[in-house]
Image (spheres, rainbow, N blue to C red):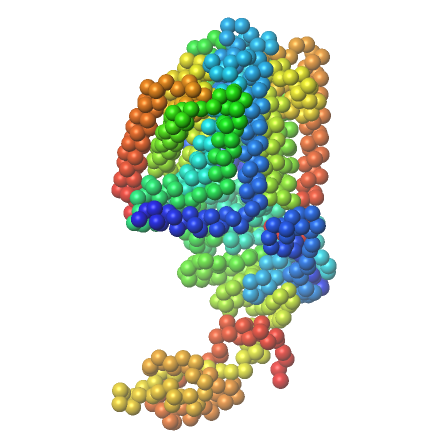
Amino acid sequence: MIRRYAALIRNAWLVDLQYRASIVLWLLWGVTEPAIALGIWWAIAGDGSVGGYARADFARYFFAVMLINQLTIAWDSWYLDRWIREGDLNYRLARPLDPAHEAVAENIAYKARTASVILVVWLLVAAAWPAVRLPFAPGRWAVTLLAVLLAAAMRFFISFTTGLLAFWTTRATAIMELHAGVSLFLAGRIAPLALLPPAVAGVAGVLWFRSMLAFPVDLLTGAVHGTDAIVRGLAAQLFWLGVWIVAYRIAWSRGIRKYGAVGG
Amino acid sequence: MTFRILAAFWRLNVVEELQYRANFVASVLGTLFSMATALLTLALFFHHTTALGGWDYWEIVVLLGVFNALTGVIEAVLRPGIGQLAGEVRSGELDLVLVKPVDAQGFVSFRRLDIWRFTDVVLGLALAGYALFRLGRTPSLAQLAAFGLSLAAAAVVVYAIWVVLMSLAFWFVSVENIAVLFDAVYEGARYPVSAYPGALRFLFVYLIPIAWTTTIPASALTGRLRPEVGLAAAVVAALAFVLARALWRAALRRYSGASG
Amino acid sequence: MPSIVTAERLSKTFQVKVRDPGLRGALRALFQPRYRDVHAVRDVTFRIDPGEIVAFLGPNGAGKTTTLKMLAGLLYPTSGRVEAAGFNPWTGGPPFKRRIALVLGNRQQLVWDLPPEETFLLNRAIYDVPEGDYRERLAELVALLELADVLQKPVRQLSLGERMKCELVASLLHRPPLLFLDEPTLGLDVTAQEAIRRFLIEYRERHGATVLLTSHYMQDVTALASRVLMINRGRLLYDGALEVLVARIARTKRIELVLGGGDGNRVTPEALASFGEVKSFRFPNAVLEVRREDAPATSARLLAALPVADLSIEDPPIEEVIRLAFARGVEEDE
């Protein structure tokens, strides 16, 4: 299995190499949204603070969003939708390899490449701009890494499962876009959850949205205090990861069954 | 000549698209959803402040309406045709386009229409109108004229930016998603220029002049526009168009020299 | 020797949504969907022994690809039984998939932006092919298909023929005993088609693989397949050797003439018409169609009566034979 993953990741890495110009553009697009949000909050915060966030806090928050969003975002619903509609699923099903492994390997290769770019940029910016510097805290960073892995895994399964809806509908990507639109607020992409109306932030915490992005970001910037809060956050991530893995398995077995009935 | 050929393509397009009524519903729903998201985002900002860059909530909603109208034009007219270009450069199909007795730039830009996207224009203008109503302001005839002109200038600037991107597709042949670059940067046009802190403002006014495209027409509607700024906008538009076309011609020369 | 593929009363019925035109129809389809049955494969039974090359022949929509997909495990039968390489294809899982190769003519598994070698390496890992075997098999396949200078170029720069050859290499690295090829020569130029046919014969010769292919091209069938399964509208019309089919169906023979004579007394089509049906006439070449049993006698009369430079008796083109078979069904000898 390890050899297969090594081969899959190597393959994906080489393909990405061919598309590095495109990847740069996608990176720019991924960075623009947090950058503009930062710009606006920076203006609003002025010399004071908003909901406990001063300008420097916003800067650290949105740089963390840039990095962690890049590490956790999953595009697989679009690929899967295309595979199913264009018949590219057939030869994958005839191989002794579950297509999900290929998708995971692609994620690993792509994220290693793009996240390292963002990390380097952050380090460079931090050299010139004190506002974005984080205190050296290896313990916290280790926990953050764990949270990031859990978030990335969960978002993968959300994306993959949504892509599997293409077995039943032509609008699978629309559903994914709906989810992305909601997570703009609830996952903390447009603002820290603390700045949302409390009821809305509550929904984000009760559902899986906080586990997607906001929690790992808060961990990294030190906005989560106390072992208790950390443990509860990680437990929520584990819970929702489990839920989405179950959803994926159901969607896959039902979807394959449907595929075997009507073909591609 | 070019126009007649384009008209023929458009007629075919429309007949094609009318078959897909589901596309219409999906398109409208999509636009409404993104507009709702934008309004909610704005509401969130205004939960914590009373003005952004000196603009109050409904003034920014006017700008949002203009933004939607402009993106509607982009999605309806420019993106379908230009979206094909990168692939055609790669596969060599572009040669088929270049031998036609038309102006290549005009043809590539305008050859396909996604007619359902014109509803975005209608929705955007409707939103702007509603926001003006909430502001209690009725634009004077002069203001409406200024709005019309600055909107036209804005469309020209946006088109010029697209032509530059199209030309880049000749150098960076592997760039399929050059439109992504536009989307990324154009997000900055959602807010008035004055809302951004210094560095970003410099970027959006001088380097990538998108600020002109929404802030100025919206200013015209809300009565904030100073005449000299409006004039400058027209000059910038003309300049942008000339520069973009020059870049396009250079790119085409290089392409025709390189291939075959 | 047990069969490697068995199909018993295999059937596949698709349920297709019925959609009335117009807006009301669209709405109704959304809330009260109605379905109609499409019988893609009906009651098909056959057995294939190891080492055979078998061709599925039939017009578009006949059910060939659907049958192939059921054999490969991509679709499950509505009724009937199917077994391939010792497994039920639908439930066979990875052990089954290691014993087959599926090549679809219109979709490729080669990674577009990288050299084919990268896809080969990927398949080596996916199928767990040992290093030594991989090198040996790759060398053999590359030699047989003459691909040596192509392996380093990205797939997108290869011609269609080169790509198909690379597809075959990628599919055979794990040396499966059973190959499913759906339209393998589709869209290829003549040289490439012939190269692939030669390769398949040679490969079968060396390794005893069983090959099932679907095709439109008669040359595929005549060059490769000892056995033809004719499918039309989901039913198996004929299962057997090609020559036997031709003999059964073709009740006519073609007499191909090269006419002599100068400009003074040129033979006219009207003159020929009394001997048989004139299928084509382009001086000096002409083709006549006569009843099979009349062919020798008519030929003798033609040679005696007209200035004939050359004459030969042929079977009608196989395409026509097949078309007749589909139109009329295959009856026993009368």
Quarter of the image for residue B214 reads top left
Task: Answer left or right for C97 relative to B245.
Answer: right
Q: Position of residue B194 (x, y in %)?
A: 44, 16
Q: Position of residue C72 (x, y in %)?
A: 63, 54
Q: Position of residue C178 (x, y in %)?
A: 60, 56
Q: Position of residue B96 (x, y in %)?
A: 34, 49
Residue displayed at 59% across by 76% down = C328
Quarter of the image for residue A78 reads top right
Residue displayed at 44% across by 54% down = C161
Residue displayed at 43% across by 20% down = B223
Depth order, front residue of B48/C36: B48
Residue displayed at 71% across by 22% down = A206
Residue C308 visible in this rendered orientation of the protein: yes
Quarter of the image for residue A70 reads top right
Q: Is residue C10 above or below residue A134?
A: below
Q: Is residue B32 above or below residue C176?
A: above
